[in-house]
Image (cartoon, rainbow, N blue to C red):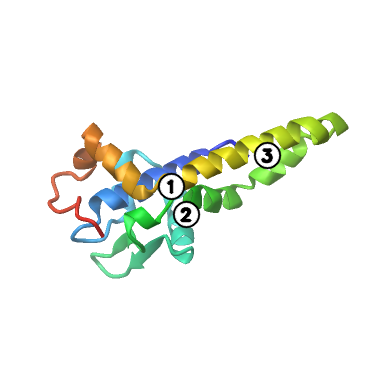
C-alpha cells in the first residue's frame, strides 16, 4: 500500500532500461544490473515474472535477453506496480498496520483511498512517457551506451 518497495523501483528502472536499449538486440539482465546499479538478484525472478505477465518477452540463446512484449505506450507504470506489489505482499503489511477499530474505520480507508489514487495516476503513465522523459533528461542516450536505434518505437 502506498509504498513502492526497492524491488518495484528496480523493476521499473529495468523495464525502462529495456525500452531504451532493446534495439536491435534483446537486453541481458546482467547488462541492466551493471548500467543501472541494480543487484542482479533483484532482477532474475522479477524479469521472469514480467515475462509470464506479458510485459516482457524473453529471448533465448547466446544473444538472448529481454524485450518489451508490447509497445511502450501500451504498458503502464500501474500495471508493473500492481504486479510487483502482488509479489511483495504489501496487503499483509496493511493488515498489521490498521488492526484497531480506529485504524479499521479511519486509517485503513484513508490509506486505501490514497493507494487507489496513486494507482489511478500511474495508470495514466506509460513506459513511453518515461522513455520520453529519459530522452529529455539526456539519460536515455546514456543508458543506451552509444547503441543506435534505441529510440525507435516498438
Question: Compared with residue 23, is residue 135 higher up or lower down, i.e. above or below?
Answer: above
Q: How many marks?
A: 3
> Is there CB contact under 8 Å for labels 2 and 1?
yes
Quadrant (top left, top right, bottom left, bottom right) of the N terminus: top right
76 relative to 72 in the view: left or right: right
Q: Residues within 10 Å of mark 1 (few under 14, many from 20)?
A: many
Residue at 44% of width from left, 45% of height from top? Answer: 124
Q: Quadrant of residue 72?
A: bottom left
Q: Which one is closest to the eye, mark 2 or mark 3? A: 3
Check disc 3 and report the residue beneath it: 112
Q: Position of residue 6 (x, y in %)?
A: 50, 38
Which secondary structure lies at badge 2? helix
Q: CA distance from mark 2 to mark 1?
A: 7 Å
Q: Which one is closest to the eye, mark 1 or mark 3? A: 3
62 relative to 79 in the view: left or right: left
Residue 79's disc number: none
22 relative to 40 in the view: left or right: left
Q: Residue furthest bottom?
A: 61
Q: Position of residue 93 (x, y in %)?
A: 69, 40
N-term mark: 1 or 3: 1
Which secondary structure lies at badge 3? helix
Q: Nearer the viewer, residue 33 or 3?
A: 3
Which secondary structure lies at badge 1? helix
Check disc 2 and report the residue beneath it: 46
Q: Position of residue 107 (x, y in %)?
A: 75, 30
Check disc 1 and report the residue beneath it: 11
Q: Can the viewer see residue 33?
A: no
Amino acid at each position: 500500500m502506498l509504498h513502492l518497495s526497492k524491488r518495484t523501483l528496480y523493476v521499473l528502472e529495468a523495464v525502462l532500461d529495456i525500452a531504451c536499449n532493446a534495439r536491435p538486440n534483446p537486453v541481458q539482465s546482467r547488462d541492466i544490473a551493471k548500467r543501472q546499479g541494480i543487484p542482479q538478484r533483484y532482477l532474475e525472478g522479477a524479469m521472469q515474472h514480467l515475462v509470464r505477465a506479458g510485459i516482457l518477452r524473453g529471448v533465448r540463446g547466446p544473444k538472448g535477453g529481454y524485450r518489451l512484449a508490447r509497445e511502450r505506450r501500451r504498458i503502464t507504470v500501474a500495471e508493473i506496480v500492481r504486479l510487483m506489489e502482488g509479489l511483495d505482499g504489501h496487503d499483509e503489511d496493511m493488515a498489521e498496520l490498521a488492526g484497531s477499530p480506529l485504524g479499521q474505520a479511519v486509517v485503513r480507508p484513508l490509506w486505501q483511498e490514497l493507494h487507489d489514487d496513486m494507482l489511478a495516476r500511474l495508470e495514466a503513465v506509460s513506459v513511453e512517457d518515461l522513455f520520453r522523459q529519459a530522452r529529455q533528461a539526456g539519460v536515455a542516450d546514456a543508458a543506451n551506451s552509444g547503441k543506435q536505434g534505441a529510440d525507435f518505437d516498438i
